Image (cartoon, rainbow, N blue to C red):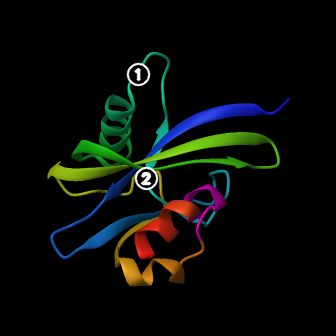
Amino acid sequence: MKKKIKVVAAIIENENEEILCALRSPQMTLPNMWEFPGGKVEEGESLHTAIEREIQEELKCEVKALDVFNDNTHEYEKFIINLICLKCKLVQGTPIATEHSKLIWLKRDNLDSLKWAPADVPAVQSLIY
């Protein structure tokens, strides 16, 4: 049986109505695909706490988690991911790519120009349409 992983991802919008997109590094699973930044939910951790911690660790900035935007389960070859995307507000600092190859801010209309990790696609489509 495949391992099921619960993951949170942040949908962070700036004052220009652009959304933060993160490029997975060549060392990561699904290399060179785009995603919303985030990570695994630890045992006993709430979704809000998990995403705020993950963004602090990965992007060296502080966000406030707002509402769940999209909840999607995707089956990959070796595991199943339950990806829960939360709308987040940037409250302090500037996101810095420490684990990702690159970070970019994109308008909603341009999100589909990137090659997204399959689990992120439903959230991307919800943002565009």
From the image, state whether disc 2 or disc 1 is nearer to you. Answer: 1
Mark closest to the chain's N terminus, 2 or 1? 2
Judged left or right of residue 47, residue 92 is left
From what the image shows, is residue 48 above or below residue 114?
A: above
- The three-letter amino acid code for the residue at tag 1 is Glu
Quick check: can you spot residue 105?
yes
Q: Is residue 72 left or right of residue 13?
A: right
What is the CA distance from the residue labelled 2 to the residue labelled 1?
A: 18 Å
Q: So how many labels did they put on this image? A: 2
User: Where are the magenta residues, as a range?
Assistant: 116-121
Q: Position of residue 25 (x, y in %)?
A: 56, 59
Q: Which mark is residue 15?
A: none
**What amino acid type is highlighted by mark number 2?**
Pro
Dominant secondary structure of the residues highlighted in magenta in the image = helix
For the N terminus, the quadrant is top right
Labelled disc at residue 45: 1
The residue furthest right is: 1
What residue is rendered at 32% in x and 29% in y? 49
Q: Quadrant of residue 121?
A: bottom right
From the image, tell me which residue sits under label 2.
37
